[in-house]
Amino acid sequence: MERSEIGKICLRCMKVSDAEGICPYCGREKAGQQTWSKALAPGTILNTKILIGNILGKGGYGITYIGYDMLLEYPVAVKEFFPDEMVDRSPDGKTVLVLDEVNNEEYDKETKAYLREARILAEFSKFPGIVAIKDLFYENNTGYLIMEYLKSGNLRKYIDDQGGWLSVEESLNLMEPVISILGKLHKSGLLHRDISPDNIMMDEDGSIKLIDFGGSRKMGVANQQVFLGKWGFAPLEQMLSKLSEQGPWTDIYGICATLYCMMTGDVPQSSYERNEKDELVDLANYTIQIDKKLAKAIMKGLSMRPRDRQQSIEELYKDLYGISPDEKSVPIVSSDEGAHILKDRNDRVWFGEYPMNEMTGAQLTSDIVYAEYDEDNIATVNGERYMRLPIMKTVDTDSRDLFILRRNVVKEEGEVSGYRYFKFNMLSWRIVQNRAGRVTLQSEYIIEYRAFDKRKYLDMTDREVSKIRSGIYWEESEIRAWLNSRFIKKAFKEEERGFLNVTKISTPISAFSDRTTYDKVYLPSIEEIRQGFDIDFTLSRGINKSRAVVEASPCSQYVAALADRVLSHSSFGLRSRGHIDGKDSYKCAENYEGHALVDDHLTLWKLNEEMGIRPVICVNASDIEEMN
């Protein structure tokens, strides 16, 4: 848009029209109105492209205006850093002047902190639950933050429009992305300190986003300006300006106060008043349908003493939603809605996703390298999931540099020298049993490389590990726990997990005795590999048995990277344990020796060795769809 066309823009609503005087959209004067003498006048242009309109709001740390990006031609929100206790506006109507009684160095420090923390926010603006940051620049002796403009009003207005309060379910659903993103902000060292219905905006799609980070500050930084927060939503340590006592629990108070207001329609009694006489009504005493545990969790977050509240967003999230934030399914963009189990013409079943193929050369774009990876080193880029494996630089006893791939980075192991990147691909499964409407599936590929039990055994020599004579059972093993928790969360979306059947697993510990477990994911035993699944092995033990041929099972590039070699076909671990007597016969025993297949021959899987993993699952035949 050319400057000559500015007159077409209404400086109140930023709608464009040829009308003069009165805006046909908002019905008010298009010229706008300067409602505070210290604010920028409507019509001011910043950074050669941002047109300033009326004030949307102001606080102790800044002024927010409605604006218009004349280059991209859309409305924006403009946050100007303006701590009114430190500054004033110069006669030119633009430049910010530092008051005589204020140290210039202190103001410069605050401005730089504002811009630095705005950059941190910009890193998180791509996530749901936080307003998108469009631009950031320095002008007029202060900083400006350009944000998306949300015109649907704030959460306070939405609550009023819905009759004064919201259901418990809607309140939790609306606040989930805000609570989740705050956990990420806290890990970056940033506190918001101004969470309330007034600072949570409604988007046109009905979702909510957190705005107004004017009161935010770095944890552990004590030389910043006092920010008291909003009455009824700020905890006592903030109302009394005790910066040293503020932490994640400060924002937790604001979250729980906001939830309290959403569910009841009442602003909680202020912490200052509660310090004199605590008359805050317990959520459980309201005539609303709320679980007692949930009410208790919210009231815990409203505790007066910081140490009595949840100490982290992760703890609060688990109290409210029953799971940790990292247990949520990773969003995946798909052209088809819902979860599916598909079978192709070759009777191959496709279900779930797992890191398989390594991204190299032109495939490895900067979007993948610089994506936001979570604690499990997983990121989503353009609807596709990727996993990165750290390469640790270590030094051996001869002081020679070694580069070792690590699943889990431990600081003591050395510094990270780089990463290898792997894309999540659909998992292919082979049908190994189809009986009475239940279909047993085994992964076609070797998709993992892990130890049977605790990783401490990997550091033992064969002599040391051979002294372990008993107590290593499938039911108590680390591999079973991992398969039925971390693997499921990693491989299957939340809606897919409901397809997994619980299977009764019998693991032999002697010729006539089994141990029974109930698992959604498990490793096969030697008997299941040889004779089939879902049968009573006690009826056939001790007699000659036909031996099934195991189909070739190639390993993925991800597994080859973990093992630092390509595993032989049909080389994977089993859950049964005991000695191998010779000629592929074995004796069950719970000790340091386990069973594995290598090139279709039975071999040992000792506790100090890792082995390829081909998991087994069971689904209902009616849930499998034929591919066209």
Image (cartoon, grey):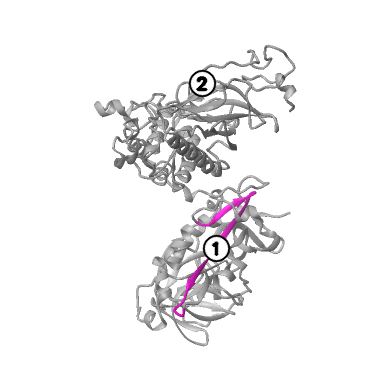
Q: From which residue to which does the magenta span run?
A: 376-398
Q: Secondary structure at mark 2?
A: loop
What is the three-letter code of the residue carrying label 1? Leu
Quarter of the C terminus within the rendering = bottom right
Quarter of the N terminus within the rendering = top right
Count of numbered badges drawn on the protein = 2
Q: Secondary structure at mark 1?
A: strand
Which label number is shown at residue 38? 2
Residue that appears at 64% across and 63% down: 357
Residue that appears at 71% across and 19% down: 7
Residue that appears at 49% across and 39% down: 112
Q: Is residue 394 magenta?
A: yes
Q: Residue furthest left?
A: 276
**Relative image position of residue 415 (x, y in whole percent):** 48, 65
**Relative image position of residue 94 (x, y in whole percent):** 57, 25
With respect to residue 452, does 328 lie above or below? Answer: above
Which label number is shown at residue 490? none
Which of discs 2 and 1 lies nearer the camera? The answer is 2
Is residue 432 visible in the rendered image? The answer is no
**Relative image position of residue 451 (x, y in whole percent):** 46, 71
**Which SS type dominates the magenta stretch?**
strand
Q: Residue furthest bottom?
A: 582
Please state which of residues 408 and 509 is positioned toward the viewer in this rendering: 408
What is the three-letter code of the residue carrying label 2? Lys
The residue tagged 1 is 389
Q: Is residue 518 magenta?
A: no
